Structures are given as structure tokens and as C-alpha cells.
Amino acid sequence: MALTVAGWLAIVCGAAVALLGVTLICEIFLAGGVPVGGAGLFAVLTLGAGPILTLIGITVLVSGFKVMGGHEWARTVIQVFAWIVVFASIGWLGYSAMHERHIHLIDVVHWGIILLVTGVPGIAMILLLRR
């Protein structure tokens, strides 16, 4: 039962990550314009992160199907992905909190949403796939 839930959660998360990557790849070809201040970041996101996120998303999606079939390598792939997501979300929260001059309620709500969307599924996959 836990492997099935973890598998479906991995499929949904993998599809979301792959969709984000495909969106960034599409921005290479369909971008109407780039703000002058963000031109370098835009290039890094579209040319670098787009293909990487697409590949990671497809890998996690396939691993979600395989973990439901009982493959041990898929469990390891999903656990590594989940730990990376948890550490990245906590790192992002720490980074954004350090650069705020005044923390307002909207900042706390924003951080809570980020943690809810990224950290909670990662922690859920880690707990579901533990031995």
C-alpha cells in the first residue's frame, strides 16, 4: 500500500517537474522578450535548467511506475529526488529569509506555501519509502 501511494505521488511530482522543464524549454523558442535585468538568469533557466528538469521529471515519473512494480532501484531514485527537494526547499526558505529586510505576513504566507508545495510531498515520499 505504501509503495503504491509513493509511486503515485512520484508520478504526479515527476510530471510537474517535467512540465516545468518543458515550459522553460518552450521559452527558448517562444519568448516574446526578456527584461534587461534578467537576461542572464533567463538564459540560464531556459538553456540549463529546462532540459535538466525535464530529464529529472521523466526519470522520477518512470521510477514511480517501477516502484509500484517492486523495483529497488526505483525506490532509491525517488528517495534521492525527495531528499534533494526537501533540502532545496529548506535552503530556499533560509536564503529568502536572510535577504529580507523586514519580514511581513505575506512573506510568511509565501514561505508556508513553498514549504507546503515542495517540502511536504518530499517528506511524504521519504516516509513512505523507508524500510
Image (cartoon, rainbow, N blue to C red):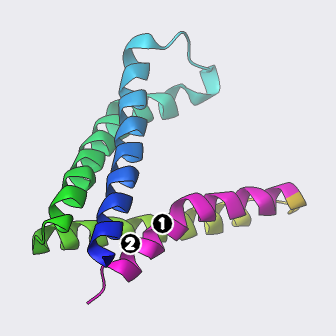
* Position of residue 104 measured from the top left corner of the image (x, y, whole percent): 89, 60
With 89 as the anchor, is 81 left or right in this view? left
With 84 as the anchor, is 70 left or right in this view? left
* Position of residue 32 measured from the top left corner of the image (x, y, whole percent): 53, 9
For the point 24% across and 44% down, the residue is 55
Q: Report the amino acid beneath label 2.
A: Met
Among the 4 quarters of the image, the one containing residue 98: bottom right
Asked if 47 appears above or below 129 in the picture, the reply is above
Q: Is residue 53 magenta?
A: no
Q: Which residues are magenta?
A: 106-131
Among the 4 quarters of the image, the one containing residue 116: bottom right
Q: Are marks 1 and 2 in contact (CB under 8 Å)?
A: yes
Among the 4 quarters of the image, the one containing residue 3: bottom left
Q: Quadrant of the C terminus?
A: bottom left
Q: How many discs mark residues in the rendered view?
A: 2
The disc at residue 121 is: 1
* Position of residue 6 measured from the top left corner of the image (x, y, whole percent): 33, 68
* Position of residue 40 measured from the top left corner of the image (x, y, whole percent): 49, 30
Q: Is residue 104 visible?
A: no
